[in-house]
Structure formats: C-alpha cells, structure tokens
Amino acid sequence: MSSLGRASAIIGAGTLVSRITGLLRSIVLVGVLGSVASEAADAFTYANQLPNSVFSLISVGILTAVIVPQIVKATADADGGNAFISKLFTLGTVVLVVVTAIATAAAPWLVHLVAGKANDDVLALATALAYWCLPQILLYGLYAMLGEALNARKIFGPFTWAPVVNNIVSIAGFLALGALFGPVSTQAADWTPEMITVLGGTATLGIALQALVLLVFWRRTGLAVKPDFRWRGVGLGNVGRLAGWTFLMAFASLAAGMYQGYIVSEASGLGASANVTANAWLIFMLPYSVIVLSIGTPYFTQISAHAAAGRDEEVRADIAQSIRTLLFFIVAATAAVAAAAIPASRVFTDNADDAQAAALVLIAYLFGLIPLTILFIVQRTFYAYDDTRTPFWFTIFQCVLIVGTALGALGLREAGIIPLTSLAAAVALGQSIASIVQTIVATWLLHRKIGGLQIRSWMAAIGRFALAGIPAGFAGWGALVLLGGVDGWTMADKFQGALGTAIVGLVVVVVYLGILALLRAPELKAAGALARRFLPGR
C-alpha cells in the first residue's frame, strides 16, 4: 500500500495542478471568445476536439489497453524489454504519422461530421482552425506512448505534470489573441487569417512542448529505444490482435461522441452547444482525473502484474479495494459538484443566466460519474488479462445506447417537448444513462470471467457513502442558499463564482466526513492512510 500511496500522491499532485491550469485555460478562453451563443468559441471547440478525439481513439484503443500490460510483461525479457519496446514504438510512430496525414487532409469532412448542423460561418472557421490543430494527433500520440512507457516502469510523475506546460502556452496564446485583436468578435464571419494563426498555432505549440517534456525523463526508464522496422517474430501479432478489438471499441465510442456533437451543433450561436458541453465535461472530469486516475492508475499496474502472474485471488482483492477507495472520494466529489453546479458553471460563463444553462448540462453528466469510476477498474481488469474483445462488446452496447438517447433527445426537440437551449443537457443525460447500463453489464461479465468480485463489500460501501453524500449535498445547497442562491453574490463574476464553489464544496466535504465518522465507516481509516501519503515527507 505504501508504494501505491506514493504513486497516487505523485499522480494526484500532477493531475491536480494540470487540471487547475486547464481550468484557468478554459476561463481565459471564455474571457476572450465568450461561451454560450459564441460562434467563435464553438468553432475552436470543434477544431481542437478533433485531435483530442483521434488521440483518445489511439490512447484508449491501443496504448492504455495494450501497451502497459505488454511493457510490464516485456520487462521480464533478458534485455529488459528493449528490443520489443523499440519495435513497438517504431510501429506506433509510423501509424501516427499516417493517421495524422490522413486526418489533416480530411479536415473539412471531419468538421462536418462533428458540427454539420452549425451554420456555414462556424463550419468555415472550424475547418480553418482544424488544419492547425489536427497535426496534434502525432504529438499527442508520441506523448502518450512515452508516458505510458514511463507509467509501466512505475515512473508516474512526468506523464501527469507535462500537460501543465501545454496549459501555460495555451493561456499565453489566448491572452495574445485578446491583446492583438481585442475585443475578439464572437461571430465566426469576423475572423481573419492572422487571428486563426495565433489561436491554432499556439494550441499546437503547447502539445509539442508537452511531448518534449517527457523526453527529459526518458533516461530514468533504463530503456534504449531506437528505430527498428523488423516487426516479425517478436509477438507484435498478438499486440495487433489485442489492439484491433480496443481500436474498434474506441472508434465506436468516437463515432457515438461525434454524433452527439453533431446533434448539439444545431444550438451553436443560439444556446448551450459545443463550448458549454466541453466546459461542463471539463468540470465533470476534474474529480475523475484527480481521484480516479491518480489512485486507479497504480492499481491498474498492480492488477496487471498480479494477472500476469496468475494470482487471481489478489486481483479480486485489488478490484474490491480499489473500487471502495475510489468511491469513498468520488461520492463526496459528486455531491460537492452537484451542490455547487451553478457557481462552478459561472466561472466558465459570461453571466448568471448562462451559468444556469451550463449547470443543467453539468448535472446531467454527473449521474454518470460513479458508474464511470467503477468501470475504470472493471474495464482495465479485462485488459490486464489480455481480454480486449469483451470490453469491445459492452462498449458497443453503450454506444448503441448513446446514439439511441441522442436520437431521443433530438426527437423531443423536434416535437417541441424540450427547447433548443436544453438539447445539450438532454444529450448529456443520455450519456450518463448509457454509462450506468454499460457498467452494470461490464461488472457482470467480469464476475463471470474471474469469479467473485467481492461485490457485496463495495455495494455496502456505496450504501454508506450514499447515506453520507446525499445529506451532504443538501447541506451544500443550503449553504448556497444562505450565500444568496442563484441570484446572490456568487453569481456576480468568475472570481466570486469560484469562491462560492469552494465554500459550498467545503461544507459538503465536512458534512460527508462527519456522517461517515458517526457511522464508523471502515473506509475512513484506509482513506486517511492513503491521504497521508499525499503529504510532503511521507
């Protein structure tokens, strides 16, 4: 537990700083480009999400699912895995170059896929920015390959700290855009080639520097990676078969996400659309990234090692322990974000009315936070057993649900049951429903695969956390009402919104821990031991 705690502390600290600077990046972007009903903000969101989407396709589809377990196994080779990893990295780089070239050439078609319901001016600006942003696919891929190799060698820090560099460069780029061309028009038709160059160029420069940072730490791995195009006879065929299923799985998720964006693009320039959805997702992902990735990533490495050694009983114990630990923190985070959704959204919007519209999208996403936390461990346990086919099928099932719920939201919009301004929230709620069902199915399938998952133990823990989290959430909402509610001082500007969010969140956490203490929840002791690992000198 000691090594897991230290690893979680390193990842958690880096992820926290990265996410905070990412929040600042989004705040500055809103200040320069606007948020709700801003054509320019939506166009940049569409363009900048394209390389992120393709990177997710590569990262989830190949790197996370395949690279970490394979590198862990390769370390047992006589050369420490040097030959295998060299061939793997060479092949990966070739694939990235080809994918990047194809995606950049296809920029107009990709933009239409994700924003086809937007007006022509938004589509034109998004396409121009996409030509600058799509080369990020190669840079993201190199960053991910290097970072996952570092993680597999239990060097966790650089991968989580490097994005801070990207965020700082992006902030500088947004400020430069505002200084050179301010006030920046929110109308897409008003943008000039010079404005596009500043915004798109700095966005890609930040990703390049993010990848470069990891090279500084590469020597710690002890690996001497060099170009090697002799790919036959070293087991890459098995890697390809594993990656094939995960790649198809990630592609299905990407397609479903693009369809969601396509539907939401109808509201671009009129109400909550791509930019609002992206910022709501950013807030949603903050606790997931800081808590789930920082604690769960070292567990994944440990689960991979135990699975490779055939120690199934220890894998089952790892699953139960990791889920209980993660949910202890994530339930508190869910309650805090739900209670503070409106002031938190005010940080990323221009006025109180826009904050309420954005908060609706955020709350719709929050229903999926706890299921996604469980799914993180369940899905990666399949990967640890070199089973990527089963996750493919339960993800396909989720994608069908996502598309179905998005179609349902569109039908409700066209029938006049929900307004255009609520379309994004309806799509987000569909995402959460799909995640809940997917997690139930995935857990059942893993139970069938490796036997008992000690489900009763962590379901009992969920019950305790809910008994504490629900009243804690109401206490947080009560604190917001005492601060003036949705018309109070917390809605006056971004700074006061952030301060109000902190106050509400603090109330939720105090009440949550107090109730768990009264219940004598056994997870308090374990979580306290883990939290102490985050303190300096521990």
Image: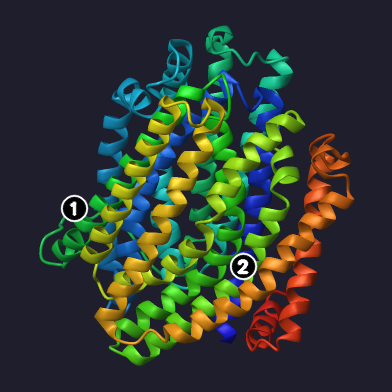
Residue in the picture at 29% in, 82% down: 308
- Can you see residue 181? yes
- The C terminus lies in which quarter of the figure? bottom right
Is tag 2's residue or tag 1's residue first in the polypeptide sequence? Answer: 1
Q: Where is residue 99? Give x, y as percent.
A: 28, 38
Q: Where is residue 193? Give x, y as percent.
A: 52, 11
Nearer the observer: mark 2 or 1; the answer is 2
Amino acid at dot 1: Phe
Q: Which mark is residue 229?
A: 1
Judged left or right of residue 354, residue 210 is left
Judged left or right of residue 421, residue 236 is left
Find residue 119 and report its image quarter.
Answer: top left
Q: Which mark is residue 331?
A: 2
Q: Distance between the residues labelled 2 and 1?
A: 48 Å
Residue in the picture at 38% in, 25% down: 111
Viewer-nearest residue: 33 or 393: 393
Find residue 6 and report its image quarter.
Answer: bottom right
Q: Where is residue 70? Give x, y as percent.
A: 29, 70
* Whether residue 375 is situated above or below residue 409 in the rendered picture: below
- Can you see residue 80? no
* Whether residue 70 is situated above or below residue 532 in the rendered picture: above
